[in-house]
């Protein structure tokens, strides 16, 4: 009976460790929009897309703090129904931005290819 109790204790301890290791959100920051957009996490960075008919903005946060985008670039592809629009974003203040006329509405899909420090990353969004 003692061996059974030991095995049960070890199994429970290992199961708890495996569960905790599988939790990919064990860091201290939240993934909430700070600018009214949609947030996704890619490679430990939070990407927040704000898509409006006259402006597209992309904010990057590294563990809750604004990431330096002064030398970054991004290309966003907007998919609304059967229409496709590609937009180049440039650094403006602490974000990447483009102004113009954009077809965005709830349900618009957006794919952003962002290059920071020569390293590209892809983030996918659905506008709310």
Image: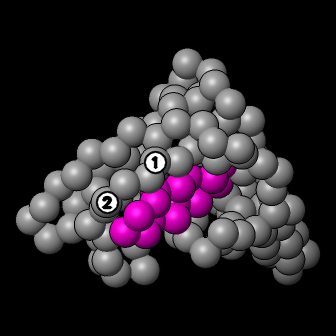
Camera-side residue of 49 and 103: 103
Q: Residue at x 56, y 70 (%)?
A: 37
Give the camera-side residue of 56 and 112. Answer: 56
Q: Nearer the viewer, residue 42 or 16?
A: 42
- Name the residue furthest left: 82
Q: Sort mark 1 into few (<14), some (14-19) or many (20+) by Cα contacts within 10 Å.
A: many
Q: Quick check: 40 above or below 108?
A: above
Q: Residue at 72% x, 56% y: name it.
A: 21
Mark 1 sits on what residue? 98
Residue 20 seen anywhere in this rendered image of the structure: no
Q: Residue furthest top?
A: 118
Q: Which residues are magenta?
A: 46-60
Q: Position of residue 106 (x, y in %)?
A: 34, 81
Task: Please say whether residue 86 is visible from this viewpoint.
Answer: yes
Badge 2 element: loop
Give percent across and percent down for residue 83.
13, 61
Q: Quadrant of residue 104?
A: bottom left
Residue 34 located within the stretch drawn in magenta: no
Q: Residues within 10 Å of mark 2 (few under 14, many from 20)?
A: few
Please tell me whether residue 47 belongs to the stretch shown in magenta. Answer: yes
> Which numbered marker is on residue 101?
2
The N terminus is located in which quarter?
bottom right
Is the residue 63 above or below the residue 75 in the image?
below
Report x, y in % for residue 92: 63, 42
Indicate the quadrant where residue 110 lies: bottom left
Distance between mark 2 and mark 1 Cα atoms: 10 Å
């Amino acid at each position: 009976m003692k061996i059974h109790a030991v095995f049960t204790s070890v199994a429970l301890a290992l199961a708890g460790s495996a569960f905790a290791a599988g939790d990919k959100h064990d860091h201290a920051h939240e993934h909430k929009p700070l600018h009214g957009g949609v947030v996704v996490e890619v490679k430990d960075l939070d990407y927040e897309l704000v898509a409006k008919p006259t402006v597209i903005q992309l904010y990057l946060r590294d563990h809750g703090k604004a990431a330096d985008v002064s030398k970054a670039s991004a290309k966003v592809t907007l998919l609304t129904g059967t229409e496709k629009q590609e937009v180049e974003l440039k650094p403006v203040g602490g974000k990447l931005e483009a102004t113009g006329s954009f077809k965005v509405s709830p349900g618009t899909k957006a794919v952003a290819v962002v290059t920071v420090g020569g390293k590209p990353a892809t983030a996918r969004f659905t506008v709310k």
